[in-house]
Image (cartoon, rainbow, N blue to C red):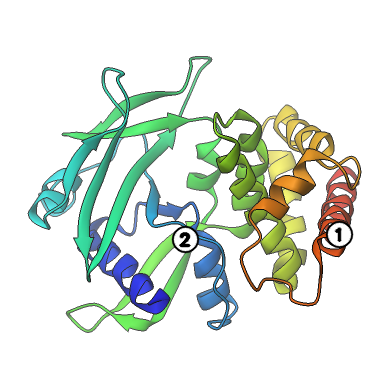
């Protein structure tokens, strides 16, 4: 069933194939791409959700004379208003391969304003959020080598680099209005750091780049956020990560052992970032 759901996810992206070179797949599906296609660990099923977060530029040019809204409407997706703001937060909902799929579009929020919704293309509105620019400017292309499109070509998608994914999650989780979303953000960070050791060196190198390329206060905020949530084993961040632990993950550890491990993983990572 999980594999079928994955096929449904990539089928949804195939519908948007004309835009795949310029959009970035983020949220809970990014770790799956890391595991299955960067590290070839297809037996691993990381935490994820059914909704698909797609990061887009602030101005998205029309490709092949079709807008994103037109493409999704033709595929049977319906728009759903998710807020009372004007313009409202909008998602696209449809059924792909027998699975309900929800797509949301995100873009970067500039200036000192509050999070809002902006028009990025005709009839396409994206929720503008802080720090999304990190994901846009630090994406990587990944080949989905076990799924081909209808024309026989290999599906290629863009996802945030693992370092950028962690950086943005560490900046945004304190701004979440829902505790569950903060918990998921922190679990994604923990999961990558603990289970993707092959990526660890590259992630640290990326943070060197982030220190040069972005406001110094962003890196300072990142460290401050994590330190505030992982000061000791009884800190809130440890319990938030524990609350998202999937059934069967880290077998052999009871809850107390798992909490100790979570704390040690974040403590080591924070120390590495502070030493940059």
Upstream in sequence: badge 2 or badge 1: 2
Instruction: Report helix, strand or loop for mark 1.
Output: helix
At x 78% / y 39%, what residue is drawn? 236
Dividing the picture into quarters, in which one does residue 5 lie?
A: bottom left
Q: Is residue 159 left or right of residue 23?
A: right
Residue 86, located in which quarter of the rendered image?
top left
Q: Could you tell me if the residues under marks 2 and 1 are in contact, i.e. CB atoms within 8 Å?
A: no
Tell me if residue 122 comes above or below residue 258 in the rendering.
above
Q: Is residue 103 left or right of residue 138?
A: left
Which residue in the protein does label 2 denote? 29
Residue 82 at what x, y percent from top left?
31, 32
Note whether 63 is above or below 148 in the view shown.
Answer: above
* Mark 2 Cα-neighbour bin, 10 Å: few <14, some 14–19, many ≥20: many
Q: Is residue 146 left or right of residue 111?
A: left
Q: Residue at x 57, y 42 (%)?
A: 180
Residue neighbourhood size for the residue with mark 1, other residues' Cα within 10 Å, grouped as few (<14), some (14–19), many (≥20): few
The quadrant in which residue 190 appears is bottom right
Near-viewer residue (37 or 42): 42
Q: Secondary structure at mark 2?
A: helix
| Numbered label attached to residue 256 | 1
Residue 57 placed where, x, y %?
A: 37, 40
């Amino acid at each position: 069933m999980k594999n079928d759901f994955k096929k449904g996810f990539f089928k949804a992206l195939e519908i948007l194939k004309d835009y795949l070179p310029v959009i970035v797949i983020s949220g809970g599906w990014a770790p799956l791409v890391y595991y299955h296609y960067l590290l070839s660990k297809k037996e691993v099923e990381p935490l994820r959700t059914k909704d698909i977060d797609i990061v887009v530029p602030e101005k998205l040019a029309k490709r092949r004379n079709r807008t994103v809204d037109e493409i999704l409407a033709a595929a049977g997706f319906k728009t759903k208003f998710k807020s009372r703001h004007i313009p409202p937060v909008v998602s696209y909902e449809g059924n792909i391969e027998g699975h309900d799929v929800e797509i949301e579009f995100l873009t970067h929020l500039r200036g000192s304003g509050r999070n809002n919704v902006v028009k990025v293309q005709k009839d396409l509105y994206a929720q503008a959020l802080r720090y999304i620019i990190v994901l846009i400017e630090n994406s990587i292309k990944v080949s989905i080598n076990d799924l081909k499109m209808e024309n026989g070509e290999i599906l290629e998608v863009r996802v945030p680099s693992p370092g950028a994914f962690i950086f943005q999650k560490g900046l945004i989780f304190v701004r979440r209005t829902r505790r569950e979303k903060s918990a998921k953000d922190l679990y994604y960070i923990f999961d990558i750091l603990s289970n993707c050791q092959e990526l660890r060196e590259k992630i640290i190198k990326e943070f060197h780049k982030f220190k040069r390329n972005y406001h110094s206060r962003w890196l300072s905020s990142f460290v401050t956020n994590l330190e505030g949530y992982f000061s000791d084993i009884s800190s809130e961040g440890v319990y938030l990560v524990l609350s998202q632990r999937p059934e069967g993950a880290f077998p052999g550890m009871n809850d107390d052992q798992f909490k100790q491990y979570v704390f040690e993983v974040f403590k080591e990572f924070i120390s590495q970032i502070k030493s940059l």
